[in-house]
Amino acid sequence: MAQPHRKPTINDVAALAEVSIKTVSRVMNKEPNVRDVVRQRVQAAITQLGYQPSLSARSLAGERSFLIGHFYGDTGGQYTHDIQLGMLNRCRAAGYHLLIEEIAYNAPDVEERAAALVNQVRMAGVVLTPPVTDNPIVLGVLQRAGVPYVRIAPDRDIDTSPIVRIDEWKATRDLTEHLINLGHRRIGFIKGKAQHAATRLRYAGFCEALADHGLAPMPDLIEVGEFNYASALPAATRLLERADRPTAILASNDEMAAATLAVAHGMGITVPEQLSVVGFDDMPIATMVWPQLVTIRQPVIQMAEAAADILLELIKRKDAGVWENPMPHRQLDHSLIIRGSTGPAPGQPGAALRPVRSA
Amino acid sequence: MAQPHRKPTINDVAALAEVSIKTVSRVMNKEPNVRDVVRQRVQAAITQLGYQPSLSARSLAGERSFLIGHFYGDTGGQYTHDIQLGMLNRCRAAGYHLLIEEIAYNAPDVEERAAALVNQVRMAGVVLTPPVTDNPIVLGVLQRAGVPYVRIAPDRDIDTSPIVRIDEWKATRDLTEHLINLGHRRIGFIKGKAQHAATRLRYAGFCEALADHGLAPMPDLIEVGEFNYASALPAATRLLERADRPTAILASNDEMAAATLAVAHGMGITVPEQLSVVGFDDMPIATMVWPQLVTIRQPVIQMAEAAADILLELIKRKDAGVWENPMPHRQLDHSLIIRGSTGPAPGQPGAALRPVRSA
DNA sequence: CTGAAAGCGCTTACAG
DNA sequence: CTGAAAGCGCTTACAG
């Protein structure tokens, strides 16, 4: 092929189209004030040459980059993957690219790392997911650098930045009420990691729902896990080995609910006849266990899309010099998914019937 | 704070250290030929100013970028997540950043998308995972643009590019022999998606192991899934509803093995007493089902690290002008993980004993 | 509606 | 061992 090895630049396009590079720039950026004839001539030259503008040149000259960051932590492969899919959906459409960085909540060098990312890469904006979504050091770095960011599922400082979330508190209330309505009174609860916002919020929703029905959480039936399968095994075991074991267990996420199911099976406790189990998140695991889990569906991909949309809007405003941070909040709807893992409390009226199915 | 809002540049550092910007550049890039006194003076200035070099300026001037891409497809959240973790481990150490792009195998615009990524972002290199690791269009774009790339778990054109993989063929042989050694003769097989290399390789290993023991695959016992849970449900159902149902089933990955387990449970077929089930990959799901799956462990994170190491080396050589592509191949070790989902074939000697446990 | 000039923050190639 | 000049490929600010 006689194709020149050197990549075509804006100069080549300008020469071919017989215009100045400024005009090529105008066409590329869809700016007004270019005659249609000229615009078409430039387009033709771009196509003919297979010209692709250099991102680094555009970033350097325009003092804005086309990179959006995702800062994430140990939230499990599926969640991270879904968030990134959602972000990619929007980034692509807007001409941005996605740069990812795993940042452990307690890494000693978070500040350095975040600062390096922000200052060297000069990202146009960042989306944060738990647990780093609540890391004040990282947020501080972004703030000081003037980099727009959106937090997904944050816990603290809700009012000082744009956020996207579901109502975890209400969701757990729904889940708990589902159990209460089935006649359960002794309900065990398995918490997640302390540094995740979800841990606090989900527990709070649980307590609130109990209170609404004149019940109180029983300290003996509260266990702590780490949002993963292995950590919930001993927690569920302690719960189920009690003489006065609970008739239902609410695990703070699906993996821990799956572990609870496994422990019950191992002990010969049948689900949902002798024990009801519910999870949270509606991850793939929820339908891979038997019986399938009653859980709360969180629209993860849509949340990521919403976060990206907000971020893109913030970037646009910032570039336009409008910097009166509107701090938009978006709360998406969750849904209670009823499947086979819950049934009437043993000894309750209807306990011999099929588990209740409702929307 | 009296901190100037403008980020410090190389000029500020040079002025403060009373040297030329070229000297600052030398210090930053750890080039030789700088007196120790001067080097320290520059370092001090960099620290004092909190100077961070701009990536876009470095990329533009140096004609090389600090971005490495990961092109991936629908291989499941966990796999993608682990690959990216492994890559990040190495990228960070080497001063590179990770840009991710999901590319569906059959997307109509793959060529455009790949070309845009490569030419606009001008990535220093790319790591590809299935199924895009075998997409000739994408590989062609990279080749023509002269962008170094490493393919993980490829199927075709093995000899024309650097690759990282495990021996899937041998791994499936190991798995199959484990079943044969337990006395199984009627072994069902659930294939994955046609466009994934693993589908062909795993099936080939299965057939080979059977042949070695004087057996042949039984066409009636070969089903096709899509590497996910839902697709394996009907496949396993067909297999297990047969009058002459298999005594063992080898699913091409863990999700499909988990589905097989669920179908067996639903039909009242006990595992491993009446049916043995094995999976592949040792994903988290393997230990979340009951009984836990016998499977093949693939060192995904290490594979990604190896791929990144090779890529970084290729980039270094290319920058140094050494472009005699060595096309390194790395094959990492897999391991057969024995857990509870297999046992002696029904009616075989030892069938009443506990399942065999071996390394 | 269009363009010439300057500059973004670095590195390369060269000179001393 | 160090630096002055030119240039990477664009955009900004300005002029006409």
Image (cartoon, coloured by chain):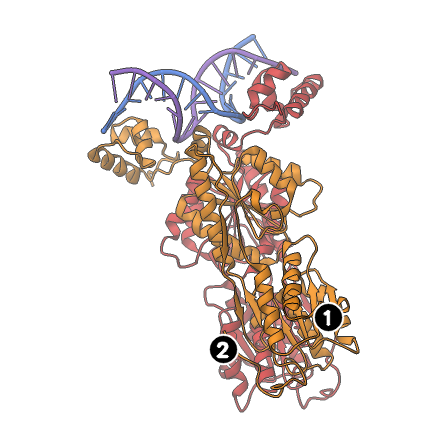
Chain colours: A orange, B red, C blue, D purple
Q: Position of residue B174 (x, y in %)?
A: 64, 71
- Counting from the top left corner in percent of width and height, residue B180 is at 65, 80
Where is residue A138, by image quadrant? top right
Residue at 63% in and 85% down = A351
Q: Chain of mark 1?
A: A
- Point out which mark residue B223 bears: 2
Three-letter amino acid code of the residue under disc 1: Ala
Q: Quick check: B118 above or below A244?
A: above
Name the mark nearer the viewer: 2 or 1: 1
- Residue at mark 2: chain: B
Sort mark 1 into few (<14), some (14-19) or many (20+) by Cα contacts within 10 Å. Answer: many
Answer yes or no: do the residues labelled 2 and 1 have beta carbons within 8 Å?
A: no
Give the distance between the C-alpha atoms of the residues marked 2 and 1, in whole angstroms: 37 Å
Residue at image x 57%, y 38%?
A: A142
Q: Residue furthest right?
A: A243
Q: Which residue in the protein does label 1 denote?
A: A236
Marks 2 & 1 on one chain: no
Picture quarter with the N terminus of chain A: top left
